[in-house]
């Protein structure tokens, strides 16, 4: 293979070279963008759960007492017993479980959304410690409250004040602004889990529709192995019942409603089409280019180039051309990815994960998590795309070169 | 075959389907001889040249170059044989448009393991002999017809061939440029002793050769 000849051929035959490179690079760019978009939607769908330090949320729907007084469970989250919890812990793929209790407390003059959380568990709503804007986070073993900053402002609550929830008084030790960070498991008041469990256990209203033991909860946050999430979701339904609401990245992905988010099959089909188009374009342009050079190949063979010499030269040209096309495709895709990363995506939060009672003002409104689409091209995808274009070049170039190398010089050099 | 014979074709025939283009031709050329093959267009002279140079296989018959039967060689063996033994000059020059003059001359040397400097030296030497030293780095598109043909002659000589095959080498040139090319070929033959088999339909041009072979309807008639 003569490198100088190769470079001259690519440089001086600009029309051929540019057509082949642009054609293939569009196919490669399409492939990269499709996959990057799909990954971006997948990543976006994980955000609502990641905000609360989990991969899966679990809640079981049930009944609300007819008389809404004192502490009650929302109809979307009733008792998950300690026994059921013990069955969940050893499931394969479970790396950690965070427990919580979400309560609606209807006191005489005020309604509270209360979330009981484990202060020290890194899985679940304890992630709120990063959202404390004033005072401090809840400490282990203390009966105290953390109040959402907007709620505190509305009711003029300050650190050092005491609040009474379902006849139990808690000192306010801190204010948190969780609503900006998370859309799930956001409440007006955060209590230690044990305190919330006491409120729930002592509520006759709650017990009347959803029997509750001292160690039971109604919200679970599970940290899981990514590849086992789907299987785990199914196992959880087997334990807790088919009606259980399992929030997973996939369930959020479905809510996004984007074609890229809807189905792996769509992405796979689109990728295959992009590759097919890229191969077709490469094959067609290279076939045209090589056919145009039949006379040149005849000359090479007449002056003593063997079939192998010809194939090696043409193959090297095709590979270099396709490598350049791969790089160009990557650059096009990177520009497109940069432009797409300004796109905002609204992830709808399902009503049953929203903590606000739907009958309160604003409670029925659809909540969205809005974020910029995290489009980026992973190194592995970039490397795959370039390898693929070189492979396309190698296969198509090799096939075409092998074919044209069989040409008889006398057939193409005859002047009559 | 006598000692002086460098190229011989015995009972050569070539058929394309039912059409017999070359009919039972026997021909021989001595080392250092300048032979012209003349005849009207379509009489089979280019096909005979292709058979004798190993560009084409005969339907029947045998071709020997320097004592080697090339009719039984594989495609790749034929290519290597051409690389080592023969040079070609075509009517339409057949230069590679993307290579400079010296690179075109060095084209037969590209597949050979040889340093770039050596290739350049050999090509440069030949181009200077063709009085094209100043056109070394020009692409064919920047050369005149006569210059292109001189580059093609240099390319045909770069591998020190035993036989030079020229197919209507002046066919695309005006008469004065054609004369100049013929002068070069004659000089090559006399100075380097290269055997030349030239195909032409111009009898006047053929008279500059040592021997004239006439073809008509696929057969040698004189």
Image (spheres, coloured by chain):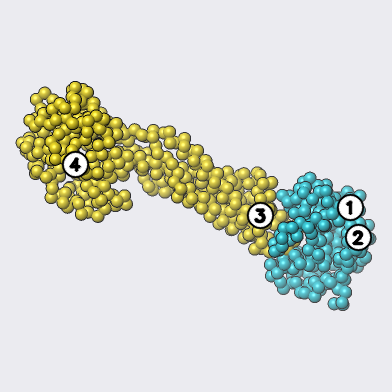
Chain colours: A yellow, B cyan
Quick check: do tags 1 and 4 share a chain? no
Can you tell which of label 2 and label 1 is closer to the viewer? 2
Distance from label 2 to label 4 (Cα)? 103 Å
Circle 2 sits on which residue?
B187
Give the x, y percent position of residue B65. 80, 71
Circle 1 sits on which residue?
B178
Along the line of sight, which residue is nearer the eye, A412 or A309?
A309
Can you tell which of label 3 and label 2 is closer to the viewer? 3
Quick check: do tags 4 and 3 share a chain? yes
Circle 1 sits in a helix, a strand or a loop, which is it?
A: helix
Circle 3 sits on which residue?
A3
Residue placed at 43% from the left, 33% from the top? A342
Mark 3 neighbour class, 10 Å CA radius: few under 14, some 14 to 19, many 20 or more: few
Circle 4 sits on which residue?
A118
Mark 1 neighbour class, 10 Å CA radius: few under 14, some 14 to 19, many 20 or more: some
Q: So how many labels did they put on this image?
A: 4
Circle 3 sits in a helix, a strand or a loop, which is it?
A: helix
Q: Is residue A252 above or below residue A10?
A: above
Q: Is residue A15 above or below residue B35?
A: above
The image quarter containing residue A204 is top left
- Quadrant where the N terminus of chain A lies? bottom right
Q: Chain of mark 3?
A: A
Quick check: do tags 2 and 1 share a chain? yes
Q: Is residue B191 above or below residue B9?
A: above
Can residue A409 be seen here? Answer: no
Q: Is residue B175 above or below residue A202?
A: below
Residue placed at 86% from the left, 61% from the top? B198
Residue placed at 19% from the left, 51% from the top? A88
């Amino acid at each position: 293979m003569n490198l100088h000849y190769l470079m001259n051929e690519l440089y001086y035959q600009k029309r051929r070279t540019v057509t082949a490179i642009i054609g293939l690079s569009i196919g490669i760019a399409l492939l990269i963008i499709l996959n990057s978009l799909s990954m971006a939607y997948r990543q976006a769908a994980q955000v609502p759960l990641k905000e609360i330090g989990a991969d899966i949320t679990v809640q079981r729907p049930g009944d609300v007492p007819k008389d809404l007084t004192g502490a009650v469970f929302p109809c979307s989250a009733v008792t998950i017993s300690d026994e059921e919890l013990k069955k969940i812990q050893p499931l394969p793929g479970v790396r950690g479980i965070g427990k919580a209790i979400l309560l609606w407390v209807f006191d005489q003059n005020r309604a509270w959304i209360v979330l009981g959380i484990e202060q020290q568990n890194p899985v679940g709503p304890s992630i709120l410690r990063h959202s404390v804007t004033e005072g401090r986070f809840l400490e282990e073993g203390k009966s105290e409250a953390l109040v959402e900053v907007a709620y505190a402002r509305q009711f003029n609550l300050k650190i050092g004040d005491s609040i009474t929830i379902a006849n139990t008084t808690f000192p306010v030790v801190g204010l948190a602004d969780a609503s900006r960070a998370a859309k799930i498991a956001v409440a007006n008041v955060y209590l230690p889990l044990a305190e919330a469990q006491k409120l729930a256990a002592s509520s006759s209203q709650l017990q009347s529709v959803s029997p509750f033991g001292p160690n039971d909860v109604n919200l679970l946050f599970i940290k899981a192995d990514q590849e086992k999430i789907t299987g785990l979701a199914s196992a959880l339904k087997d334990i807790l019942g088919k009606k259980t609401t399992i929030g997973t990245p996939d369930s959020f992905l479905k809510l996004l409603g984007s074609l890229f988010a809807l189905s792996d099959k769509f992405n796979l089909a689109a990728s295959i089409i992009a590759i097919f188009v890229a191969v077709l374009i490469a094959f067609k342009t290279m076939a045209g280019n090589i056919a145009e050079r039949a006379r040149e190949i005849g000359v090479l063979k007449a002056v003593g180039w063997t079939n192998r010499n010809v194939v090696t030269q043409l193959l090297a040209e095709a590979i270099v051309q396709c490598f350049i096309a791969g790089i160009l495709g990557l650059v096009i895709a990177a520009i497109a990815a940069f432009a797409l990363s300004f796109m905002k995506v609204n992830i709808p939060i399902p009503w049953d994960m929203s903590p606000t009672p739907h009958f309160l003002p604003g409670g029925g409104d659809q909540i969205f998590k809005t974020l910029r689409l995290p489009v980026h091209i992973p190194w592995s995808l970039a490397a795959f795309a370039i390898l693929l274009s070189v492979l396309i070049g190698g296969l198509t170039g090799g096939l075409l070169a092998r074919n044209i190398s069989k040409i008889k010089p006398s057939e193409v050099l005859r002047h009559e | 075959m006598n000692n002086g014979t460098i190229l011989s074709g015995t009972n050569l025939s070539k058929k394309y389907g039912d059409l017999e283009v070359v009919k039972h031709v026997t021909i021989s050329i001595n080392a250092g001889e300048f032979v012209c093959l003349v005849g009207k267009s379509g009489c089979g002279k280019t096909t005979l040249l292709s058979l004798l140079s190993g560009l084409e296989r005969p339907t029947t018959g045998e071709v020997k170059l320097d004592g080697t039967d090339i009719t039984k060689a594989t495609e790749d063996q034929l290519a290597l044989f051409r690389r080592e033994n023969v040079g070609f000059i075509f009517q339409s020059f057949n230069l590679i448009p993307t290579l400079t003059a010296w690179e075109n001359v060095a084209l037969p040397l590209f597949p050979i393991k040889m340093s770039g400097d050596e290739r350049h030296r050999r090509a440069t030497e030949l181009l200077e002999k063709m009085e094209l030293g100043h056109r070394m780095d020009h692409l064919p598109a920047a050369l005149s017809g006569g210059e292109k043909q001189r580059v093609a002659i240099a390319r045909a000589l770069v591998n020190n061939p035993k036989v030079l095959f020229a197919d209507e080498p002046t066919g695309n040139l005006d008469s004065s440029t054609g004369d100049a090319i013929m002068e070069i070929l004659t000089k090559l033959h006399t100075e380097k002793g290269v055997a030349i088999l030239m195909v032409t339909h111009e009898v006047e041009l053929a008279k500059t050769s040592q021997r004239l072979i006439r073809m008509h309807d696929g057969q040698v008639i004189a």
